[in-house]
Image (spheres, rainbow, N blue to C red):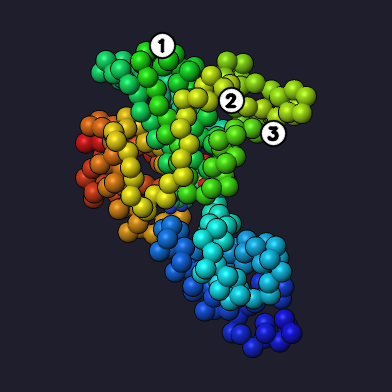
Amino acid sequence: MGRVLARTESSVPESNEFELTDKDFKFIQWFMHKNVGIFFSDRKRTMVYGRISRQLRRLGLKRFSQYRQLMEGDQQEQVNFINCLTTNKTQFFREYHHFEFIEKVLMSEWKGQNLKQLRIWSAGCSTGEEPYSLVSSLYWAKAFELFESIQITATDLDTKVLAHAKQGIYSEEALNSIPSKYLKPCFVKGTGKQAGNVKCKSGLQRFIDFRQLNLLEKWNFDKQFDLISCRNVMIYFDRNTQEKLIKRFYQQLKPGGVLFIGHSESVPASLDLFHHLGHTIYVKK
Ligand SMILES: C[S@@+](CC[C@H](N)C(=O)[O-])C[C@H]1O[C@@H](n2cnc3c(N)ncnc32)[C@H](O)[C@@H]1O
């Protein structure tokens, strides 16, 4: 049956395990773009098929149309669907020049401003390596001696990665991407049941507030931020969504606040909102 369907529907190039028609794929493109801003080009179809197949297998379904029907009346299944289609790749101290910039440049800027409270937002934090790297970098640069309060807000759309981030337990392989200067002061190795795992020290973890947040929806922040790090998130959005988001980041930053973005992302100069310092670092005009 699967084979017949695969031939009669105009394209099911991926495999015959379940049916994904052109109409289904168009629905997925529309749904993800409308709800979370992620745009899947036609070239991403095989990847989408692979990710969704795990959901269909779990539920014993043979056609995506059955899953769509089930999803329409089930909020949790919509969350599962979105979670399975997000790309969560991350690592500790990814794009290290941002952390060097905090330690070598921003710390003295902030000192000069006589800032009492420091507020940072890690937007699209995935499994948490980014906010834990930020808090470690601040600790190493003695920011805790400088400010009366430090608050890192870490948000992601995906509830599954956020649960991991809150827990903050990583396999020891993570140590490969943590520069040695942070290891002893900021991280602990697990013992007993946690042997083979590593964690950011709880004394630092408590400065991070993890929250679920869809960047496309309303943000409920009561204050502006000194630094927003939104790295390797906008790359999945179309240009229009990217520009809207950049304008909202501008509003959410204090005057002179800093925006970090990912290595293959950019802020169009035509928006005239930021000074570009190079290396994907932007300062609010
Ligand atoms: C590739 S990860 C980047 C993680 C980290 N910032 C880094 O650079 O290593 C992208 C993250 O953005 C999140 N994301 C995608 N669309 C989002 C949206 N509309 N709102 C909030 N987070 C979103 C995904 O769930 C994913 O965890």
Quadrant where the N terminus is found in the figure: bottom right
Label 1 and label 3: CA atoms lie apart by 31 Å
CA distance for labels 3 and 2: 12 Å
Q: The disc labelled 1 sits on which kind of residue?
A: Glu
- Residue 97 in sight in this render: no
The picture quadrant where one finds residue 228 is top left
Q: Which amino acid does label 2 sit on?
A: Cys
- In-front residue for pair 280/120: 120
- Does residue 160 appear to the left or right of 241 in the view shown? right
User: Is residue 198 left or right of 146 when viewed as pictured?
Assistant: right
Name the residue that disc number 2 marks: 200
x, y (%) of residue 113? 25, 18
* Residue corresponding to mark 1: 145
In primary-sequence order, the first of circles 3 and 2 is 3
Classify the position of the C terminus by image quarter. top left
Crowding near the residue tagged with mark 3, few <14, some 14–19, many ≥20 C-alpha atoms within 10 Å: some
Q: In the rendered structure, which disc, 2 or 1, sits on the residue that comes first in sequence?
A: 1
**In front here: 219 or 277?**
219
Q: Residues within 10 Å of mark 2 (few under 14, many from 20)?
A: many
The CB of the residue at mark 2 lies under 8 Å from ligand 1: no
Q: Where is residue 176 in the image (x, y as percent from the top left)?
A: 66, 30
* Disc 3: which residue: 171
Q: Nearer the viewer, residue 220 or 273?
A: 220
- x, y (%) of residue 62? 68, 75
Does residue 281 appear to the left or right of 162 in the view shown?
left
Query: Taking the image as drawn, is residue 248 in sight?
Result: yes
Question: Dot 1 lies on which element?
Answer: helix
CA separation in Å, label 2 and label 1: 19 Å
Three-letter residue code for mark 3: Ser
